[in-house]
Image: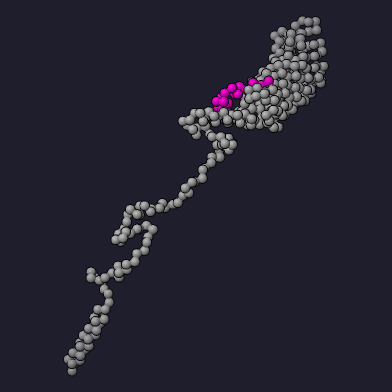
Amino acid sequence: MTNIKSILSLLLLTVFFQQASATDLDQVVSGGDVEDSLATSKATESSPYIIHNAEGEIDNQKIKANAQPDFMFNEHPKEVSVKDDSKAKFQDVGYTPPGSFESKENYIEIDKKAMVADFRKQSSGAINITFIKNDFNYESANDVINKTISEGYKHVKGGALYIRSDQYFSRKDFINPFWSLGGGLGYNSGRGIFVTGERSDTTFKLWEIPVDLGLGVEIPISHWFKVSAAAGPSVTALYQNRNDLLAGEKGRNKMQVSYGQFANAQFKINLSGFSADTAYTLFTESKITNLYMNLEARYQNYRNFQDEIKISGTSIGIGFTFEYL
């Protein structure tokens, strides 16, 4: 009985495995003879990177011809401006910076002349440095000042050095109004003279310190020459020192002040006007638009000192004017 049950169980297991094997035969399994379902599709999608020819192969020639850069730039990029370019002002009005025509000297020369002609007219101010000879008249009790600094033993009537700043209200072709502020320093000395006419061993030193505030005009005759004139109120200080008294002793040093008037006239010769190259070099290196040599005449009148002293008259001198932007 037991053997019969074992045989029946074995038969049932055999039938089950045969049915399972028949079902697996309808499925696709991996192997060398199995068709790839992806390869059965004949449709091809165009790619921006791969181009096929009629035979379905990759066409390398067309890939190269249609290649595009990873980043796209404008065909005409904006020019980058340099904000710190010292010649930007002149580029804005149509000048070509020197050096743009490296092998064309004629263009550079024409450009320099045009630039120089422009910045000569663009000055906003000027500094005047002038030495005025001391030919002024001095009036004092017993004429002691003249006898000391003009006739005294080892006298020195040295003159004065003046520095003045001019600021233009406007720049025109025919007349340029300006206001000015300036000052000077003059030195004189000599041995004193007694009332009897005998010479003293005392040395007197007289310092003059004028300060001027004025209004003026200048008239450009051409870019080589121009004339200017200014006038206004002035004040000057006289500082006196004598060596026959001890330091700190009363009378050794004395200061007195007087108000008055001044006027001056200048004939200016433009030293930078004779050569465009010189003017251009001077401007690019120092921003000086014009350099003038001046012949100057100065008038002054001071009559209000604490002592009975009067200083007046006209004297001449020579100096320089530096105009700048």
Name the residue at 37% across, 61% down: 46
What is the image's colouring? one colour
Let me know if residue 242 appears in the view. no
Name the residue at 77% across, 5% down: 198
Q: Residue furthest front?
A: 54
The part of the image, by quadrant, that contains residue 245 is top right
- Magenta residues? 267-284
The part of the image, by quadrant, that contains residue 211 is top right
Name the residue at 32% across, 59% down: 53
Decide if residue 183 is on the left or right side of residue 120: right
Between 208 and 282, the one nearer to me in the picture: 282
The part of the image, by quadrant, that contains residue 36 is bottom left
The percent position of residue 168, horizontal first and vertical second, equals: 69, 30
Specify the quadrant that holds the N terminus. bottom left
Between 104 and 271, the one nearer to me in the picture: 104
Specify the quadrant that holds the C terminus. top right
* Rendered position, 30 above or below 190: below
Let me know if residue 65 appears in the view. yes
Is 276 a magenta residue? yes
* Rendered position, 190 above or below 26: above
Decide if residue 137 is on the left or right side of residue 43: right
The percent position of residue 299, horizontal first and vertical second, equals: 75, 19
Name the residue at 77% across, 16% down: 313
Q: Residue furthest bottom?
A: 1
